[in-house]
Amino acid sequence: MNLKNKKVFLTRPYKVVYKDGDRIIKVFTKEHGKANVFNEALCQARVEETGLDVPVVEEVSQIDGEWALVIKYVEGKTLEQIMEEDRENLPKYMEQFVDLQLSMHAKRAPRLTLQKDKFARKIASLKDTVDATTRYELHTRLDSMPNHIKLCHGDFNPSNVIVRADGTMSIVDWAHATQGNASGDAAITYLEFALKDQKMADLYLDLFCKKSDTAKQYVQKWLPIAAASQLTKGIEEEKEFLSRWIDVIDFQ
């Protein structure tokens, strides 16, 4: 596969995404690792089996010695773009966003990794960032949370929702998918909003709790765990913000 004449669609520290007609080609750096690429393809394929509206994985291959993932292209704007362009109707778009997340949580993908196992591994990996006492408290809190088997995205935010011209929505980027607790998934979404806009984060949480009939305090109990998970991404400008949430072990 020759990428010389392909349009660069997106650039990230560990990948370059190209558009090739009706396909997206994600080319990963060697540091990302072969196993991670195959795991993302497997997660995406297992989510496809739920019947949820997601892009279809077409191919895993090597391009110039680097692993690549080929996925069907979904034409449209991200929900993030639409929210930014039409702020007056933000409540309407946020309601659509939450409804989409709840429709996802209603699905089951029993062969995906368990969310609590993934959270536990991430907390354990923070030895150089989080002290042993805090890690112990985080593990204890995680162990106490109920075990659920709902389909969870793990990075559900408006930039990962594509809105087609007819208004239908497709959820993309399933590399972090697990089966687990919807409120744990919502806690990650809340923090991603809060990193950019606290008012949007509060609007999101109010709607999620209302529509899912979930106590806000219950989602908040997941926030230190979710913050620890997000901290493993190693994004320097997010470190101080996420560390504050990890320290709020008894947040009310």
Image (tube, rainbow, N blue to C red):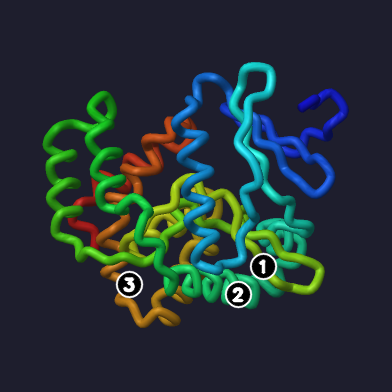
Residue 203 position within the rendered picture, expressed as x and y whole percent measured from the top left:
51, 70
Specify few, some or many for label 3: CA neighbours under 10 Å numbering under 14, 14-19, or 20 or more: some
Three-letter code for the amino acid on which mark 3 is drawn: Lys
SS at mark 3 in the image:
helix
Viewed as shown, does residue 30 lie left or right of 125?
right
Q: CA distance from mark 3 to mark 1?
A: 27 Å
SS at mark 1 in the image:
strand
* Earlier sequence position, callout 2 versus callout 3: 2
In the rendering, which numbered label is found on residue 169? 1
Q: Would you name the residue on which mark 2 appears?
A: 96
Q: Would you name the residue on which mark 3 appears?
A: 216
Three-letter code for the amino acid on which mark 2 is drawn: Gln
Give the residue at x 74% y 51%: 73
Up/down of 109 relative to 231, above or below: below
Give the residue at x 23% y 58%: 251
Q: Nearer the viewer, mark 3 or mark 1?
A: 1
